[in-house]
Image (spheres, helix red, strand yellow):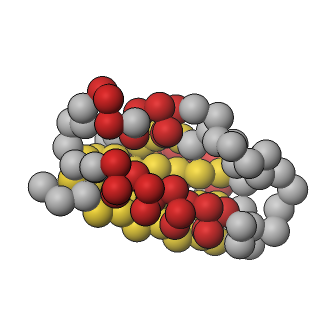
Amino acid sequence: MRAKFDISVNVERSLVRMTMSGSFSSEDIAQFVIARDEVHHMLQCRPNQHLTLVDIREMDIQAQDSGLHSLLHARWPVCRYNEPLIVATQANFRRFMKQSIGF
């Protein structure tokens, strides 16, 4: 399955939502990083005061050497980024949203 991602930002809530699906090549990862950086620069909150949710329920299993695993789990390069919350199941996502930010 071809790689696909969607990134949106809610500036008022300091919330970034990402949905990733398919299998990511190194070119797809590079495009994702560019899009991620553009969206994070829209945030108006102080550094590390936002939340990033990443929904990977539709993502294919990735090769360990693809670089995607280290990208998602590493501390992101600019101080504005904190570590993302990876959501693998719909139940976990709903529970987290209710407990954390009242969605």
10 versus 32 height, above or below? below
- Residue at the limit of the structure toward the top, as seen here: 64
> Residue at horizontal 62%, vertical 69%?
38
Percent coordinates x, y for residue 3 in the rendering: 25, 58
Q: Nearer the viewer, residue 30 or 22?
A: 30
Quarter holding the C terminus is bottom right
Vertical comparison of 18 with 96: above or below: below
Q: Position of residue 57 (x, y in %)?
A: 28, 47
19 horizontally vs 39: left or right = left
- In front of the other: 19 or 26: 26
- Location of the N terminus by quadrant is bottom left
What residue occupies the far front of the structure in this picture? 27
The answer to whether one can see residue 94 in this image is no
Residue found 61% across the figure and 61% down from its top? 37
Residue 83: percent from left, percent from top: 62, 39
* Relative vertical location of residue 66 with respect to residue 42 in this rendering, above or below: above
Q: In this view, does 84 lie to the left or right of 49?
A: left
- Residue at far right of view: 46
Give coordinates of residue 8: x percent, y percent: 52, 70
The residue at the point 79 percent across, 46 percent down is 79
Q: Which of 2 and 9 is in front in this view?
A: 2
Answer whether residue 77 is visible to the viewer in this image: yes
Q: Residue at x 53, y 63 (%)?
A: 34
Number of marks in the rendered image: 0
